[in-house]
Amino acid sequence: MNQEKRQRWLRLARLLLCLSLGWQISPLRAQDAAIPQTGVGKEIFTLIESKRHPELTQTDFSSRAEDLSQLYQAVNYDLVWLNRADSAPLLMQTLDLLSHAAGEGLNPRNYDADKLKGMLPSALQLPVVAVRKRALFDTAVSLSLLRYLHDLHYGRVNPHGINFNLKLRDKKLIDLPALILASRNQGQIAQLTAAAEPKLDQYRKLKQALAHYRDLAARTAQLNLEIGKSLRIGETHPQLEELRRFLIQTGELPENAAPAKASKTTPRYDKELGEGVKRFQARHGLGADGVLGKGTVAALNAPLSERVTQIELALERLRWLPDIGSGPYILVNIPAFQLWVYEDISKDEPAALRMRVVVGQAMKTQTPVLMAEMRFIDFMPYWNVPYSITKNEIVPKLLANPGYLRSENMEIVAAFSDNAQAVPLTMDSLIQLKQGLLKVRQRPGKKNPLGRVKFMFPNKEDVYLHDTPSKSLFSRSTRDFSHGCVRIEKPQELAEFALRNQPEWTQEAIQDAMQSPKMQRVMLQKSIPVLFFYTTAFAEQNGEIAFYRDIYGHDTVLLEALKNPSDLSDQSLFITQTNAVAEAVH
């Protein structure tokens, strides 16, 4: 292939790649066509074309090749780091940045930080004629920095690969090569972290907590509390002084907390220590009753290094989120069994509304992670019974008791629609129910499991938020009892928030709608984003970190995925021509 044909082929390949990723195409720069034929430029170009780097632990960089190519095109395939008077301080800043990747919950080994630091002295002494070695070191630093910034901004794992159905990004909002060159030219490499990391207040607080818990894990002896039966205030136990010291170190008790009083020679579990245990329980998603039971003791004995890991995983998951923007937002954290409503998600302000929720059963019907838009509310809704429940639960009950539907205020219909007419129960309709040709729905009323209102945000998993007549479940510390939808503690308050900008929907109007015998659908004038998320470490408004049990095992799955580091493909992050239709349907 001659030079002219090669240049045309490269321009065409670049055009096709941009179109396939849905990116805007910038004008072709002069250096795009200027392929170097000699010297260090040729070495750099050849290495980028190979998509393999022999000096790095992870040699294949196919998914970062475009970024690396754009970086060196911008400097006409010259050296980015080794051709400057300030090469030494710039490189030290860069490698220090990679060395401190753990402060972001990332692994410095993934960026060859120590290896590159060891190579730096000899690299700075390389003569100009050592074009191959200079090109190798320069591109190694650039590639490691690109990897770090990409991981920091987008995360290291494709969330869709582990059933986190988050929205894909429309387009790139950050130009990593341009960001690197601007920071280099200003001599401010350290600012790259702040420029690339997520701009979420939750992320900032968790990063601060990560440093605190790392320090705590390093200087705090692990507790090994041994308790047979549950221990209550007023009872004695020989390890209560150890417990007191531990709670002081973790911040659940003040520094001047008095030693546990002894009964003869054994310390007594007093109210002050009990208050510290209650604070610990509340921080770890346990019933804050002060009783040292099996679950509380297990949480107390867990190594603090596990809390560090939980925070690291929380940071990783936040990187997966596309730009959230500003304005009202509804967030459900599944393992926390909590819902938060924000007036403006972009502001560091207390949630306008917070409530307990019941989520899907851990072993059967897990609530999915998703992002959607709440578009309408159904007051006094029908419950459209899923086919699996109809087949496995309702049909057998009808065979045993033909009056079951009437007793449960249910009816058979041909389809789930507002004007559907009831179909009589006959042997033929029973067979069609079992086959899925007919459906069962429950009329509005006291027995309806959706309660008096449901909040709809169309999604492929067909889940939603709804009221429930089973209010007693909200008092439990573990609340995974639903078939996948999320039951909410304060349905009227959520309805008032969702309809606050629609004047006709006063508090009284909402109350009337929730007591009407008929269903009423209300469209929202402006949709509200909803996020069902999953994180076992969460920063509260006051900055304190709450920890929760990994009820669905998602932490275990993510840890396994992170064991084999690889470059995340941009094609998995952005809407392409092939998945745009599917994304729109969902």
Image (cartoon, grey):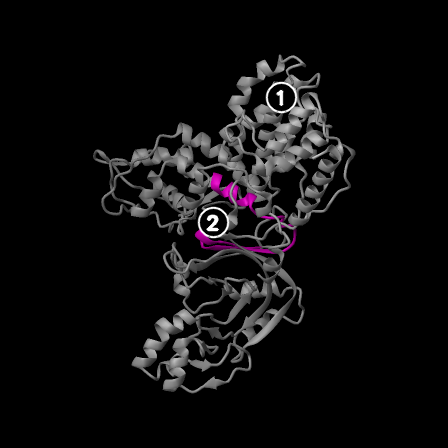
Q: Position of residue 69 (x, y in %)?
A: 66, 33
* Total residue callouts: 2
Position of the C terminus by quadrant: bottom right
Task: Reply above or below: 429 against 144.
Answer: below
How many neighbours does mark 1 have within 10 angstroms: few (below 14), some (14-19), or many (20 or more)?
many
Task: Reply above or below: 34 against 526.
Answer: above
Q: Quadrant of residue 408?
A: bottom left
Q: Residue 402 shows which numbered tag?
A: none
Task: Reply above or below: 540 against 67.
Answer: below
Q: Residue 91 shows which numbered tag?
A: 1
| Residue type at the position of mark 1 | Leu
- Work out whether residue 89 or residue 293 is closer to the camera in this orientation and state it: 89
| Residue type at the position of mark 2 | Ile
- Write down the residue under mark 2: 162
Residue at (57%, 76%) from the top-left corner? 520
Q: Position of residue 431 (x, y in %)?
A: 38, 81
Q: Which residues are magenta?
A: 312-341
